[in-house]
Amino acid sequence: MRLAGRRALVTGAASGIGRAAVQRLAAEGADVVGLDVAATGGVVADVRSDDALRALADRGPFDILVNAAGILRRHDLLDHPLDDWQLTLDVNLRAAFRLSREFARGHIERGTPAAIVNVCSIESFTAAAGHVAYTVSKSALLMLTRAFALELAEHRIRVNGVAPGVTETGMNASLRADPVRSAALLGKIPLGRFGRPEDQAAAICFLASDDAAYVTGAVLPVDGGFLTQ
């Protein structure tokens, strides 16, 4: 119950890592509001919209913000539609910037501490074929995490991220269902299994808690050792 008495807003809360984060934060004692374009029992809103920003004021204040919303559109580089490029950057990067900035603004005005956790990716560190917009958005989210951490440290607002490896979500379900591609990918993971959303949620909860009180600007790989190779 290390988050008892705290309130958290989690985007992308209807599925995958976002949903697992909602469950883990609540299990640790937090009062959690989920935000997603799909119904979550929380706020139904597009993370890119002003409705998402209004949720910070209308349902807040929150002590913790988890930016877990994200999309992946697979295209070969030369055929990548510009609309999908822009959509990916808007959801994965611009939305996190807008929400984090407004979240921080409120805490600076109140003079209260807070924590932001961004869901980055192993593709914040390394590229993957067919993922150009996703890779760019997630590498930029890593630097957004560090830039926010630098400027907000004096206000006692910590900003960190997790970098999930291949995690069992709908985003990669077709890949994992292909025996050949799945086996090849597992061969690159020293721990020998795909991640579970709960693995990511545990790391998110740690970074949001006082156990990480002296941690800011960090992006923690939760990848089974993928990035060691």
Image (cartoon, grey):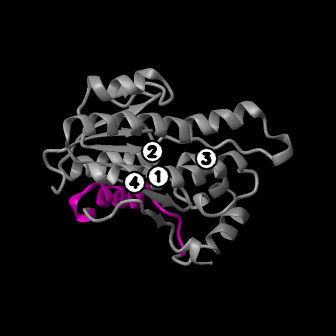
| Amino acid of disc 4 | Ala
| Image quarter (top left, top right, bottom left or bottom right) of the N terminus | bottom left
Question: In terms of sequence position, does the residue under pointer 1 or pointer 3 come before the other?
Answer: 3
Judging by the rendered image, the residue that carries numbered circle 3 is 137
Question: In terms of sequence position, does the residue under pointer 4 or pointer 3 come before the other?
Answer: 3
- Residue 222 percent coordinates (x, y): 46, 65
Judging by the rendered image, the residue that carries numbered circle 2 is 68
In this view, the residue in front, 180 or 188, is 188
User: Is 27 left, or right, of 167 in this rendering?
Assistant: left
Disc 1 to disc 2: CB gap under 8 Å: no
| Amino acid of disc 1 | Ala
User: Residue placed at 75% from the left, 51% from the top?
Assistant: 130
Question: In terms of sequence position, does the residue under pointer 1 or pointer 2 come before the other?
Answer: 2
| Span shown in magenta | 192-212
Q: In this view, does 202 lie above or below 41?
A: below
User: Is 202 left, or right, of 94 in this rendering?
Assistant: left
